[in-house]
Image (cartoon, coloured by chain):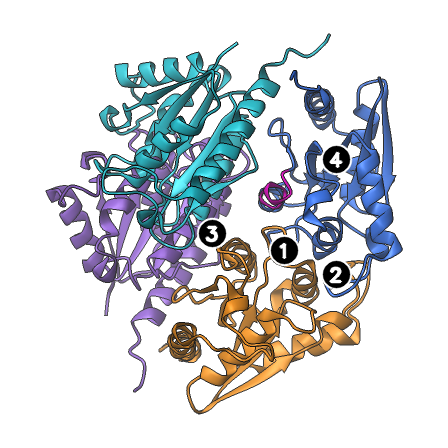
Chain colours: A cyan, B purple, C blue, D orange
Amino acid sequence: MAVSILGICGSLRRASLNRALLVAVQQTLPPGTTFTFDDQLGGLPLFNNDLTDPPEAMALKAAIAAADGVVIAVPEYNYSIPGVLKNALDWVSRPVATAPLRGKPVGLVGAATGMSGTIRAQTHMRQMLVFSDTPVLAQPEVLIPRAHERFDADGNLTDEPTRALLTRFGIAMIAFVERHRVPLSA
Amino acid sequence: MAVSILGICGSLRRASLNRALLVAVQQTLPPGTTFTFDDQLGGLPLFNNDLTDPPEAMALKAAIAAADGVVIAVPEYNYSIPGVLKNALDWVSRPVATAPLRGKPVGLVGAATGMSGTIRAQTHMRQMLVFSDTPVLAQPEVLIPRAHERFDADGNLTDEPTRALLTRFGIAMIAFVERHRVPLSA
Amino acid sequence: MAVSILGICGSLRRASLNRALLVAVQQTLPPGTTFTFDDQLGGLPLFNNDLTDPPEAMALKAAIAAADGVVIAVPEYNYSIPGVLKNALDWVSRPVATAPLRGKPVGLVGAATGMSGTIRAQTHMRQMLVFSDTPVLAQPEVLIPRAHERFDADGNLTDEPTRALLTRFGIAMIAFVERHRVPLSA
Amino acid sequence: MAVSILGICGSLRRASLNRALLVAVQQTLPPGTTFTFDDQLGGLPLFNNDLTDPPEAMALKAAIAAADGVVIAVPEYNYSIPGVLKNALDWVSRPVATAPLRGKPVGLVGAATGMSGTIRAQTHMRQMLVFSDTPVLAQPEVLIPRAHERFDADGNLTDEPTRALLTRFGIAMIAFVERHRVPLSA
């Protein structure tokens, strides 16, 4: 059975390296995987727990619920994930009991122009996903330093070691998704 | 010389416990301190590094720059700081070289209905402020668990141990601000 | 088939609350689970990567390899895990390719006399286990605050809500172990 | 007045890159700074709070107390600080009220053969030092990736950009120490 993956990009920039990375993830996933981009983060209002869900939040929750797994591209701003991405997480995480990330297999990838490759942001993201009881793929980590040297001006991945890493990530991610949908024996 | 403190609340909720906590901080600061509330976080658009600063971001940067120190009330959503607060941090942190949080003394407080009292969110916030080279008061930490039992329906602090903690925090915060504005000898 | 769990206590204290907690975990595991205590952490020398494995490190690695899953009781010293526990982790984590924690399901529990219930230490422990590609149970978290009020002088658990939490933890832990030993289809 | 710095290396390896880094820190400190190495971490027993301080712990506490500031070289093992270093921290941190790290200015440096340059370990170390109310220099961070390419076989620093970074670190560290020993006006 085909595995469906939802890709979420934490940056709103038009020429985002993390969006380019997510496209490269899509291109390197094993055959038989379907991949859907979510581009609704920029349409969400700022989260306020006094409000009811806006349509954009309901749509994002539905997209997560419908996917077998989620891959999130995590930029690093101020040593953490972007406010834009955290804001989306705040919207989709309520009510806790039925939050679509509960039990949903997630993989993280991230690109940065510096040397750290979004280590700090991904560390924070992993901690957040403990709250929602979300299994997160541990290895291989996709931490891409000097990312601007690895994509061309059109956002195409040009670095073969990165492509090899993404291929290993894709295989591990699909196995991770399959492990989490195996029904356990009674 | 009077010390001026800017208070920033990370929640947009009308009856926010963290806003009530920040009011209590204001009431317990040592005499001679001026305290200004910032209430502009809800007016900021989602951060996009392709855009120039909106007026709300410029106003927030100016308010931080004008204050001797900043106290941030940090709610905890999904084991981290709210997207709303991170979004504001993303706006005020550029350009890096002239970001108003650089060298600005900051204190953190946080209230939660659960037992952890925003430990995880404050830990993340401290890490973020390393990026901007911002000194953050270490102790006393203001981590208020079961906060709903410590304020009345109008948001007034009713718990004396919490008031005593805030008084110690205020004294430490002002000393921290003064330490960081002492000009060093050549 | 019976599930075998290895229990590791991060404290060397004779009357350790974390050891008492681990005993309570053992008592509340579902029927059919075998539980073995490891008490070798205190016999390990300080880790030095110039040295070959001492017998105590080889024994601990073998014990981890033989178990279906591991439950670690994580005290909190200085806002992190004890040096004693980290030292043991340093010994068992090499060589990386054959480290026994690779892919081994782990659950964390922790007791503290303060309010945080070892939140910070467990957060650090989770991050460390990403390195070794170790799946860690997300929820329920076992964070026991004011632990000295929940055990009697002989280390017996006397607090029923804690027992109920441990029972839920045990069920989740065994399901987690079973999920990770299900062979995936080709 | 001369500033005295205590250097502590978190690795016991004979040809430790972090020891070489600490030597390079010593060589690049501003004139008028005295620098003392501590080499007692390997002599400490495993921490057990049931025990009284061994002589090695008392000596380390005295050395920290006598210094104006401390620079710690933080290797990264298992995405955190070495057990050896954490064990030393556990010994010197009691009793809390008189712990020598309370208020003592600390700077962190770290070298690794990989790309991250000990980011994760230093992040953990910073969190630990919040417990002891220890001011930690925020910037510049000294995170040395591919460190084996930056020192020769005798441990001499051969990389000029690293030397320039250490020079900036040394200047910032001494200013940080001086800021924290300025007596505040009454």
Q: Quadrant of residue C7?
A: top right
- Mark 3 residue type: Ala
Discs 2 and 3 share one subunit: no
Secondary structure beneath dot 2 equals: loop
Q: Is residue D162 above or below residue B168?
A: below
Q: Residue at x 30, y 28 (%)?
A: A47
Secondary structure beneath dot 1 equals: loop
Query: Residue tagged by mark 3?
Result: B164
Q: Position of residue C67 (x, y in %)?
A: 81, 33
The magenta segment: C127-133
User: How far is the residue under mark 2 from the one under mark 1?
Assistant: 10 Å
Which mark is nearer the camera, 1 or 3? 1
- Mark 4 residue type: Val
Query: Residue tagged by mark 1?
Result: D77
State which chain disc 2 sits on.
C
- Mark 2 residue type: Phe
Which mark is nearer the camera, 1 or 4? 1
From the viewer's perspective, tell me whether residue D41 is left or right of residue A168: right
Q: Earlier in the sequence, mark 2 or mark 4?
A: 2
Q: Is residue B89 above or below residue A60?
A: below
Residue B88 seen? yes
Question: Mark 1 and mark 2 in contact (Cβ < 8 Å)?
Answer: yes
**Crowdedness near tag 4: few (<14), some (14–19) or many (≥20) residues, C-alpha within 10 Å:** many
**Disc number placed over residue C71 in the picture, else none:** 4
